[in-house]
Every structure is written in structure tokens, then in C-alpha cells.
Amino acid sequence: MMDFLCQSLHYKNNFLTNFERKLLSSSSSAASLSGFLPDSIHVNKKEYRPSIRAVMAPPQPQRPPSTTGLVKQAMTMTEKILARASERSNLDTGENVWVNVDILMTHDVCGPGTIGIFKREFGENAKVWDREKIVIIPDHYIFTNDELANRNVDILRDFSVEQNIKYFYDINDRSNFRANPDYKGVCHIALAQEGHCRPGEVLLGTDSHTCNAGAFGQFATGIGNTDAGFVMGTGKVLLKVPPTLRFVMDGEMPDYLLAKDLILQIIGEITVAGATYKSMEFTGSTVESLSMEERMTLCNMVIEAGGKNGVVPADQTTFNYLEGKTSAKFEPVYSDEKAKFLHEYKFDTSKLEPVVAKPHSPDNRALARECKDVKIDRVYIGSCTGGKTEDFLAAAKIFLASGKKVKVPTFLVPATQKVWMDLYGLPVPGSGGKTCSQIFEEAGCDTPASPNCGACLGGPRDTYARMNEAKVCVSTTNRNFPGRMGNKEAQIYLASPFTAAASALTGYVTDPREFLR
């Protein structure tokens, strides 16, 4: 065990970058941490011992007992979760604390880098801090002939076997995903479906959309490979407590709106920098009425506003979803009535309309009906944001109501293997027993693809539905920056599954109310 004093710590872009001044005593401590320090800080490497076994928080000054009795500090949900995880009775915004991590997730894009850092800093033969708290999910560049992408999955497999990782969702036969019972698909949806998301816990992942799990009333955020390598060896991470923005959404949600409309409305309101390193807490009667999958959509895109994390208070909807998915005990927390929020935004959901985010930013908000003259070349329904079962049911509802065929290529990429099975097994309400796959076929859509992240992140050139040409696409994904889905000249309109399906039927950006009246 080592003791060291961290006098001050700064963050940049939400990642740990700088220990300022004194690392105490042993040169082994300094050598072990050398990979985490900038070149401007000198580290004595004469006596190198590769392992870091534990990290201790700085000693706290003794405080005299209060003369007026115990005073409880009001805290937000995020502050309470981090206080519990750092073994503190209370926390203040801006404090830097060592947090005990409940789950660390990594995938095929960032996993190899994380593993490399772990081995470099802790030693080739080091063991992870807890083999049952690390979840490894291949999902990004899976169904491709790119040799480097395939090698990444091999690295994950070798490491998981070496470390006896309990939750490694492997894929060996890429020609038929159904031949791989362990393979799941998109990490954020798989984490939820496999019971790794639980109220009151801390979940970190090497992916910016890890904030998706905040829908379960937990602290969930993306971290970089360096932080993840450190967590992999210690089970701890140093975090700055973020201030909280509260979004109160009340009113009956119109049947032509989905959670994607709500989050695009919010991002358009506060901009892509409006929540930088802040927690976004969603409350109100509208939020309470949302399903877990819709709550995931809401929390998934807080990173597009710069948010550190998004969070929805756990309730009976949460508990019902978790039944049969996990046997682990969990304890929900809720914001105190007198908790301090940096700012509060209120929305009357009943007055909102379907929206899109025009190229090339998620905050470039416009009403869908204002874009009716925008001709499109294709539609993409998929990703962690818009590839869940309920997203496809929503699209099927539009196709069913219209009774028409799509006018542009319409690509369907289920997030997980379970979602894919739902498309072929669940009857669509009001369809007379038809499944999503039958409705999609009748509408002339492409056959649902193998579950993975697909073209959301572009990927190798042979990725299914990748935008290899400068075309216009309406997509249920989360980002529309230049080159995000492939070609740098392509134009991406972010939209809900309702709006995406309606646009597929007309060949133009279309308000879904045209088919839902």
C-alpha cells in the first residue's frame, strides 16, 4: 500500500490530466504513477515496482464536534451517489474525491488501449482489481473484414481469458451473429439488458455515451483509456463533483413525440456547451411517464450538451425493468428538497413539436415541419440512441399507419441480439399480429442487419450502411458532425424514429403528424 498526498488536481475535457505537487516518499509510488503524469513533472524511476495496490485519499483535518448537533447537508442525486462511493457523509460541488467504482465497461475500440495502459503501469502479470466488475463488450467494428478491427476483438478475448473476466460477451463467428450466444451488441443497451445498470451505483465506461445508464438513477459517465487502465487495476478513480442542472418536464406527452424530441429540444435550448462538466437531472410528470428505454434515450445524449452525466430518479418503472435481470442489492438515492441546483429549466411537454437537429451539430435545432423541403437520400434507424426495441416499434407504427412503401433506402440496425429477436417475435400493437420485421418488409425497408453500432461511428469502409458518399440522411443516431457517419461532406439530420420513418415514406424531412392524425 502506498501513501501519497495530492494537493490539487485539474481536469480538462472531463479526463484526469494533472497531479500538481507532492507525491510523498517512495520512488516506487512515483514510478507506478509515471504514466499518469505530464512530462513537466519529474518522477524518480530508480527503483521501479510496477504494482499499485491501493489509492488512499488525502488525510482530512480533524474537525471539532458541532455544538448544535448533527447538521445534514442537502445534496443532489449525483452528489449523494459520489458521497457514498467516496465514503463521505457529504460533498460539495467542485470537490475532487477518490471514488470506488461498481462497474467498468470497455469495448473493442478503446479496450485494447485500456488493456495496454493497465499492463504498462501495473505489470504484464498483474491482475485486475475485480474480474466480476469489469464488463467487456465487442460492439463497434464487428461485421467488417478490416484486419485491425478484427485484431481488436482478439485482444479483448485473450485478455478476458487471461484475467478470467466473468462478463465478456464474445463473438467468434462474424458470418452469423446468431451462432454466438454470448454476443450481445451495442454496449450501452447490453449493459441495461444484462442487469449491469443499478440505482445508486457508479458505472464508468470507455465510451462517451456511457451516460445512457443514468436512466437507472446511477452515476454513469465516459472516461478515457488512461483513467480506465487505472480503474482496471485499483477499482478507483479521481472525480470532480459536478454541479447539477435540473430539467423539469411536465404535461401530457403528445402521441407524436418521443424522448429523442425532448433531448433535442433541450440541447437546442442550452447548446452543445450548455452543460459542460455538469450533471443533468431529469424530473417531472413527463419523465415519470417514460419507459426505461425512453429514459435511456434522454440520458444517452447529455454528452451532446457537454454533460458529465445524466440521471433520472429511480421509481417503480425502474424496479420493474430490473426484475429478473440482477440479483445484486442496490439502494436508490434522490435529491434532497433543499439541494442546490446550478439552474432549473422547465418545459411544458404538451406544447412541444417534433424536432430535428440539422447539420452539422446536435444543437442546430429546427422543427421538423420547417424542414419539409429538404430532400433526403436515405434513412438510418439504429444505434444506442435509436436502435432499441421501442424505437423500432415506433417506426413500425408510422409504416403501418401509412400503408405505403419507403421512397429512399431505409437501413435498420438493431442495437442488440435481443432487440433483433424482438423485431421478429413481438407483434406491433394494432397490427393484427404483424411483427416489426413483417411491416418493414412490406414497406420496402432493408432487412434488419446484425446487431452492432453500425454506421453511427462511420467505421471501416465496408461497414453496413456507412455513408461513403456525400448524401443526405435522416438518422436516429446521436451525432451529426462532419464525417461522423463516414463521408465528410454528408449531411445528417438527427431525428426521432417517428420522424425518421415518416421521412423515409416521403423522401423529404417530414413531420410524423402527417401519418399519425
Image (cartoon, helix red, strand yellow):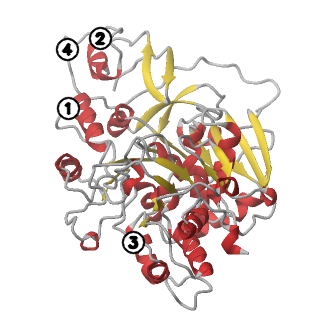
Mark 1, secondary structure of its residue: loop
Q: Which of marks 3 and 1 is in front?
A: 3
Is residue 89 shown above or below 392?
A: above
Look at mark 3 in the image and give the residue it sits on: 448
Taking 447 as reference, is 319 left or right? right
Taking 212 as reference, is 26 left or right? left
Q: Nearer the viewer, mark 2 or mark 4?
A: 2
Look at mark 1 in the image and give the residue it sits on: 123
CA separation in Å, label 2 and label 3: 54 Å
Mark positioned earlier in the residue sequence (2 or 3):
2
Pick the front one: 488 or 450: 488
Taking 79 as reference, is 253 left or right? right
Mark 2, secondary structure of its residue: loop
CA separation in Å, label 2 and label 4: 11 Å
Q: What residue type is labelled 4?
A: Glu
In the rendering, which numbered label is found on residue 43? Answer: 2
Please report contact status of discs 2 and 3: CB closer than 8 Å, yes or no: no
Quadrant assignment for the N terminus: top left
Q: Residues within 10 Å of mark 2 (few under 14, many from 20)?
A: some
Look at mark 4 in the image and give the residue it sits on: 47
Q: Which amino acid does label 3 sit on?
A: Pro
Mark positioned earlier in the residue sequence (2 or 1):
2
Q: Which of marks 4 and 3 is in front?
A: 3
Please report contact status of discs 4 and 3: CB closer than 8 Å, yes or no: no
CA separation in Å, label 2 and label 1: 18 Å
Is residue 441 shown above or below 26?
A: below
Q: How crowded is mark 3: few (under 14 residues within 10 Å), some or many (20 or more)?
A: many
Mark positioned earlier in the residue sequence (4 or 3):
4
